[in-house]
Amino acid sequence: MRRPLRVGFFSTGGVNADFKGPEPTNPSAGALLKGLRELGYRYGSDVILEGRGGEGRPDRYAAIAGELVNANVDVIVAAGPTVDAVSRATSRIPIVMVGGAFDPVEAKVVTSLAAPGGNITGLTLQQVDLVGKRLELLKEITPGPGPIGVLWEESSVGSWTAAQSAAEARGWQLLPSKILNRQGIEPACARVKAAGARLLLVASGAVLFENSLQVTQAATANGLVAVYALRRFADQGGLMSYGADLADLYRRAATFVDRIAKGVNPAVIPIEQPTQFELVINMKTAKLLGVTIPQTVLLRADEVIQ
């Protein structure tokens, strides 16, 4: 009898217990298993998830990647910010990348989207490509010459670089704050406010995503009109998010796992881009901030949280 496919799963946040069993509490792991069920995989007999949570601590990623490699998994599904650590830990085990605030070709993670080469394939978030649109949304809601604060971190440096280019092209001033850990989030928002900015772009990577509730609370407490890349932030009180549907990407990652399990070399599996983008607006937060969302923006929203 053939043993179940062992799928390693590396998330930027959470703890290992979040990934246990056929109904894990981690929503991304749940979306992946849903995709595998749709392809006919039964948990336990056909597939087992070997999950690891990074707890929002990039300093631990190398050690966790080593754990997964030593766990004798057949393939590793890795959240974007963890891909570098996993790729350094193994050139043998296939890696399915999901998301990340970087361009995988520019970052030299893969050779090209059409023919990745090596042992990495998967899906991108197109985080970098959407930075300019997020900045435009901020200015549409709160027009004027004022500066825009930016929270970014090492794993979202691609988004910060894109923000610089977009702002320069439009003549906008940015006030950047690089976040190293959760302790730096509230002081960074306070500095943005003290410097005279009302607007905030959150270019999230591992730390900001894992501490999303603290980010949205700090932004709102400091009266900042903020835009985020992922709806998790809007669901947790952030004013507005615009980006790819993360759950859809993890569900689609199952098709990559399936192809690799059937013997296809990841080097020749093209990297896919998001097909669904969503604009989510939290009207509760808009009222708290005293912000009027223009009708032109509301009409484009995929969901309005009342």
Image: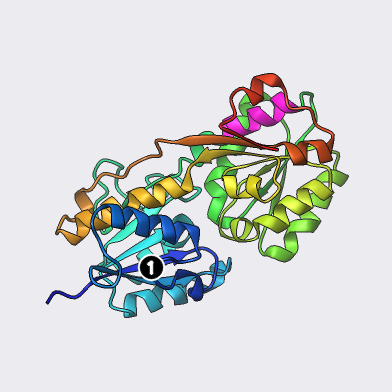
Kind of residue at disc 1 = Pro
Q: How is the image coloured?
A: rainbow
Q: Position of residue 254 (x, y in %)?
A: 31, 54
Q: Position of residue 62 (x, y in %)?
A: 46, 72
- Determine the secondary structure under disc 1: loop
User: Residue at 83% across / 51% down in the picture?
Assistant: 190
Q: Is residue 193 above or below residue 36?
A: above
Dividing the picture into quadrants, the one containing residue 289 is top right
Secondary structure mostly taken by the magenta-highlighted segment of the chain? helix
Residue that carries the numbered disc 1 in the rendered image? 22
Q: Is residue 134 within the magenta segment? A: yes
Q: Is residue 176 left or right of residue 43?
A: right
From this viewpoint, which residue is outermost toward the top? Answer: 296
Q: What are the residue bounds of the magenta stretch?
A: 131-141
Is 247 in front, or is 145? 247
Q: In the image shown, does 291 or 65 lie closer to the viewer?
A: 291
